[in-house]
Image (spheres, rainbow, N blue to C red):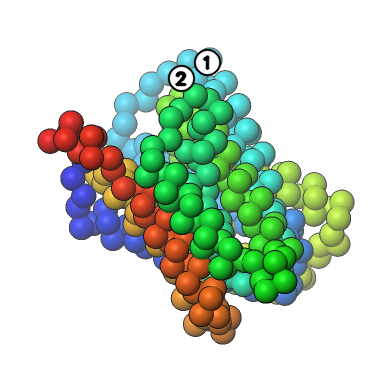
Amino acid sequence: MKKTSLRSSLLLFLTAVIWGVAFVAQSAGMEYVGPFTFNAVRSVIGGIVLIPCIFILNRGKQNRQRSRQGRRDLIRGGICCGIFLAAASSFQQFGIQHTSVGKAGFITALYILLVPLLGLLFGKRVSRRVWIAVAIAVLGMYLLCVNEGFSIAFGDLLVMVCALLFAVHILVVDYFSPRADGVQLSCIQFFTCGLICAVGMFLFEKPSFQQILTAWMPVLYAGVMSCGVAYTFQIIGQRDTDPTVASLILSLESVVSVLAGWLLLHQALSLRELGGCALVFCAIVLAQLPDKINNRNSS
């Protein structure tokens, strides 16, 4: 089992903070540009930022001739990941227009629970602990999203679809990541996502260079910090960190999104909604705790 160093934990915590604040940037960007425009520009920026990261992270490694199959897996994987990333981020961006940053952060984080449930389709068993976590999350989502009229807000529904798509995206990444370099795979997926969103941008929106310049701060933060810097921090931080510990630290993203929305956008949640957030976060943590059996086998 990997030992968690203070440096690695700090990098992962910074990743969670950057991703949590990115929800504020996404919400602020909607005041100037459309959802497709925002995602197209930020994704292209993220891909450009990762290009020097690829050279830095691969520096000192032996240059090995990549097989034709390896190149095919890298390109095919990057394109497939980019397609699902474009779909998930688009639903998220549209959803943020109609819900608060804090709620969007917690609903999006449900992908952590959805991944093992989708694994049932591939014959993977789900532990009793995960089912308990799902039950807690359902109760939390009821408090967070269902109002007194027993209806779900349109924005919350869009972000729920986003969480499902992100869960599928994770499974696609899980399939291709052993077959290709992770940073290169992410770089291709960002450019693919940017291209797909650019199509939606020109079809359904009326982008202008002036609008993009006006939104430069949230777009640049989402592209450089959220895509480029945070992803690199995650890669470096997870090298010396146990996966369970890493996922627990990264799940703080949802908590940061609530705090960032409150501090920067003055978006307050009701006591009922805060209770729902607390239950969802407990469910996320519970789903990521290691099994007792695995602990005994590793000791």
Label 2 – label 1 distance at C-alpha: 8 Å
**Which element is circle 2 on?**
loop
Name the foreground residue: 83 vs 256.
256
Q: Residue 261 vs residue 14: left or right?
A: right
Label 1 packing within 10 angstroms: few (<14), some (14-19), many (20+): few
At 56% from the left and 28% from the top, the residue drawn is 121
Residue type at mark 2: give it.
Arg
| Relative image position of residue 275 (x, y in whole percent) | 47, 72
Q: Residue at x 70, y 67 (%)?
A: 150
Q: Quadrant for residue 214, please give it.
A: bottom right
**Residue 220 spot, x, y in % from top left:** 58, 64
User: Which residue matches tag 1?
Assistant: 69
Residue 253 visible, this orientation: no
Nearer to me, 182 or 282:
282
Task: Identify which amino acid the numbered label 1 is placed on.
Answer: Gln
- Foreground label between 2 and 1: 1
Tell me if mark 2 has few (under 14), some (14-19) or many (20+) residues whose alpha carbon lies within 10 angstroms of its own. Answer: few
Tell me the quarter of the picture where residue 249 sits.
Answer: bottom left
- The location of residue 271, given as percent across then percent down, is 51, 80
Which part of the image, by quadrant, shows the C terminus?
Answer: top left
Residue at 34% x, 38% y is: 59
Q: Residue at the location (27% across, 56% down)?
A: 9
Check disc 2 and report the residue beneath it.
Answer: 66
Disc number at residue 15? none
Q: Nearer the viewer, residue 283 or 46?
A: 283
Relative to 69, 293 lies left or right:
left
Q: Residue 75, image x and y in percent?
A: 59, 28
